[in-house]
Image: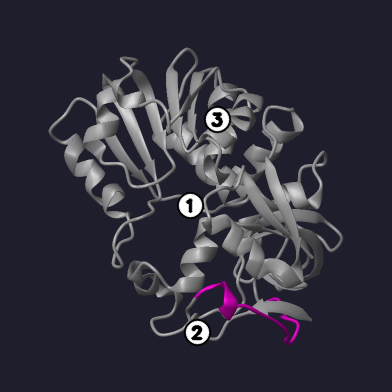
Amino acid sequence: MKAIVQDVYGNPEMLQLRDIPKPVPGDGEVLIRVRAAGVDQGVWHLMTGMPYLVRLFGFGLKKPKVPVRGREVAGVVEALGAGVTRLQPGDEVFGTCEGSFAEFVCAKEKLVARKPANLTFEETAAAPISAVTALQAVRDAGQVTAGQKVLVIGAGGGVGSFAVQLAKAFGAEVTGVCSTAKMDLVRSLGADHVIDYTRDDFATAGVLYDVILDTAGNRPLSVSRKALTPQGTLVIVGGEGGGKLTGGFERSIGAPLVSLFSGQKFKGLVSTENYQDLEALTALIEAGRVRPAIDNVYPLAEAPAAVAHLHEGRVRGKVVVSV
């Protein structure tokens, strides 16, 4: 089969289209014929091996442990490993795995669910990591309820575009923060208000929010908390732009400690992958409450360009690789 492979950590030029053996599903796994694969920030980190914290998490100290890139997948179940009971060959599915930039990939059954019937494979591939992360940020960490004021920083990005829609689905009044070029997208996602961060500073605007979901950059906690109600919650999703060791994730690590000395709550989100949340998303998508925003779709051979495009920071929603 054809796959996008890398032998050493580095930039997108390290990614190569090669012929490699077709994988065989192990116990509890399904073999998926890949139709599309999402491109999330994790792909960049696993490709570069940066920050070094990524390597310490078991993805390979000197080179990638799994040479095929890609973690979000949408496709059709081709074969079953021993012990698989929830899925059958022919099922159209989506989920997370290691190595989805390929014609076939093996995924654990517990990380895969049947795809939404009203989405294409390309649209579906945008959801497994970004939408699940947004769901856990809105529902679990932020505990968003009807009538609350919610601010989504990075509202035009992969996680942020889903967070805006999910917060609206939970009944909140949503304000999205994004660049000028993404304002129309964020409005189309249902945001009640949109702030262009290149022109206005939400932290000094005088509006207080019950929940702030920070999905972009490396903004200090001291800045965001200015726009938070006295009992409000700040949820930090990931981190970019930091040093080589932690890469901005130090905010998530230190956030709970700050909460000990304040009525405000600061939470660093570490999302967990599971089929139950994929099924919860499917229900929302099929009900018309949530829909992926796709910036561009690249063929498998151009996956390196897709990863490079994501890292430029101008992506409106998600980038997808079609297989």
Query: Compared to 193, does 288 lie above or below?
Result: below
Gap in angstroms between the C-alphas marked 2 and 3: 37 Å
Q: Is residue 107 among what the camera can see?
A: no
Number of the front mark, 2 or 1: 2
Q: How is the image coloured?
A: one colour
Part of the protein shown in magenta: 11-25
Number of the label disc, if any, that sits on residue 8: 2
Q: Secondary structure at mark 3?
A: helix
Amino acid type at mark 3: Val
Q: Please rate how many residues cluster around mark 2, counting C-alpha atoms within 10 Å: few if below 14, some from 14 to 19, many from 20.
A: some
Identified at 57% across, 72% down, the residue is: 12
Q: Secondary structure at mark 2?
A: loop
Number of the label disc, if any, that sits on residue 164: 3
Q: Identify the mark nearer the N-term, 2 or 3.
A: 2
Q: Identify the mark nearer the N-term, 3 or 1.
A: 3
Front-most of residues 238 and 143:
238
Residue 286, image quadrant: top right
Q: Are marks 3 and 1 in contact (CB under 8 Å)?
A: no
